[in-house]
Image (tube, rainbow, N blue to C red):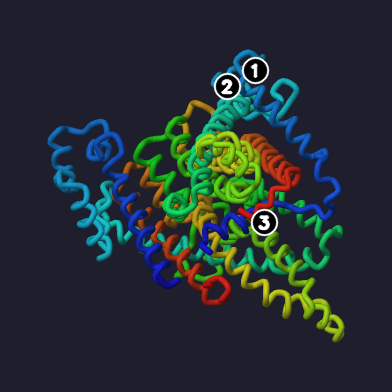
Amino acid sequence: MTIAQEASEIGAGAQGWEAPDTEARFRLGWIPWLCIFWLTGLAFAAIAAGVLPFSDPAATDIANRVMPPSARFWLGTDQLGRDLLARVIYGARVSLTVAFGTVVIGAIFGMLLGVPAGYFRGRTEAVLIGAADIGLAFPPIILILMVVAYAGASLVNLIIVLGILAIPIYMRIARAVTLTFAQREFVLAARALGASHLRVMWRELLPNVTLPIMVVAMIGMSRVIVIEGILSFLGLSVPPPAPTWGNMIALGVSELGFHPHISFVPSAVMVITIFAFNSIGNALRKATDLRESAL
Amino acid sequence: MGQLQRRLLHLAVVLFVVTFATFAMVNLLPGDVALAMLGPGATPEGVAQVRLELGLNDPLVLRYVHWLVQTVHGDFGRSYVSGEPVADALVRSLPVSVELMILSLLLSLSLAIPTGLVAAYRAGRRIDQALGMVASVLLAVPVFILGLALMFLFALVLGWFPAVGYVPLSEGMLANLRTFAIPAATLALFEWPGFMLVLRGDAIEVLQQDYVLLAKAKGLRDRHILFRHVLKLSSFTLLTVVGLTMAGLIGGALITENIFALPGVGRLIVGAINSRDFMVVQGAVTVVAVGFVMINFAVDALYAVLDPRVSR
């Protein structure tokens, strides 16, 4: 058993919080619903930010600098008098775009590689899984820092790098799920009816792999949001003046002792968002009875 | 092929890929590295000079071998900004990062062991649910936000510890530990949920074993059973998890250093990226990545030695 296999097992165990009762398996509790509400609201605001009556996130207003949250500025203003509410919403655009793009790249390529690996077994599997293991052996934050250092930080670069880094994880899961389905009767039946390998993988296996992949993608979203946050906190993500949650937090550090809201407003939004993705992912996992220990 | 040979082969392949990727990154990415190093004001002569110095006109594989030989001998080249040998900068900053990681690991384990055991012993009860709640909230807090929150609370509001800065170990252990207090606590809290939850899950299983029942029947006290019998078996799982979280710990340490202005490798790398000091980036990244791979290998090997079931 390799480290990477263990990682997916134990990492999964560490993420999930098993409720002692299994009765409520198909009911979402109120927390996941609240999380869905938060994420839909945030996504809607981020997409429609240009149309909604937010103030300009770049407009400075020196008369109203470092204002605490009030009726006029719901979340307060920063050192340049910029409205934190507008900046948080525009920052959500960056975070959510990077997270979504990364997860889509990782999941699609992960499935494209993982399903054949689990279906054909043998040499295909050995080569693909070997490559994934090597990919997982690299400390991700180091690789990301390196690419950002040499290629420069932009939205597209970030999505490509983070997306490629995510592929091995989704590939392992796609393969593991495929393994459990590849020997089932409906696959044999499709083969017996003369379906080609390609058709079996596309029509019989892929639909079964998609749901577990989506569960993992939910938690993957929160991981990417953290990484983007770290990079932009260090000044290595989308360059200013574009607001990102990370660079907003970094801007407030020097004022932490006097006007802590400048850092803590974007921090709170970020934490709630990450928590929302995590708890929806965990609720989905329980509802779908996805046994991560099998992965 | 035996288990050990396979592991060694895997290690060799991973080390090759990691070092080659680190090396090739400077050379293969779009744009001229020499130009990038010199910045916008570069003259053609300057670029040609740097290209010659870096050996950029040789074939890539040759350059890789040359670089690898130099690196193995401890020669990482010189910084393009300060002219200082990269090796010196590494020797200066590595101990800071290592101290941070060791302190936080100790702190984290000393928090996780009692809480994990109690949560397992009282599984499903109120204290278990409370710990689970705290853990799931902490899992949603990125390490840099956690760091800022602790800095705000303990340095700015309570004033117990300095917010930023670093006092070397040579200037007194206590002063040194004071500067490490908040950063180490940050990383420890960041690692705690993972350790606690894994230990809890494992201990719940162990608690259902017959010998625990026997120990209870003998009249041993709960604390004795938990720490002597359950922890002994679970410590093996814990060891694996500690190994597995190395990536998170290294990444977390690199970020924490940047928040608290600790002069470790993380600060070195980020500073070098910002000043486009690619020799420093390359050297530091190589050291961290190879260190990470070696730790993983060691944990894997230790795992096989400790649990004979793994090497079947």
Give the residue type at disc 2. Answer: Pro
Q: Residues within 10 Å of mark 2 (few under 14, many from 20)?
A: many
Residue type for callout 3: Gly
For image coordinates 47% across by 49% down, the residue present is: A140
The reply to whether residue A255 is in sight is no
Tell me whether marks 2 and 1 sit on the same chain.
Answer: yes
In this rendering, the label closer to the viewer, 1 or 3:
3
Q: Chain of mark 2?
A: A
Question: Which disc number belongs to residue A54?
Answer: 1
**Dots 2, 1 in contact, CB < 8 A:** yes
Other residues around mark 3 within 10 Å, as few (<14) / some (14–19) / many (≥20) = some
Q: Residue at x 73, y 75 (%)?
A: B230
**Most extreme residue toward the bottom, as rendered?**
B218
Q: Amino acid at mark 1?
A: Phe
Chain containing the residue with disc 3: A
Residue located at (72% from left, 20% from top): A72
Q: Is residue A237 left or right of residue B15?
A: right
Judging depth in this view, the residue of A123 and B88 nearest the camera is A123
Cα separation, mark 3 vs mark 2, equals 41 Å
SS label for mark 1: loop
Which residue is nearer to you in this view: A77 or B254? B254
Spot occupied by residue B189 in the image (x, y as percentages of width and height): 64, 57
Q: Which residue is mark 3?
A: A13
Residue wearing tag 2: A57
Residue A77: x and y in percent read 63, 27
Measuring from the top left, give residue B167's x and y in whole percent: 48, 62
Residue B106 position (above or below residue B188): below
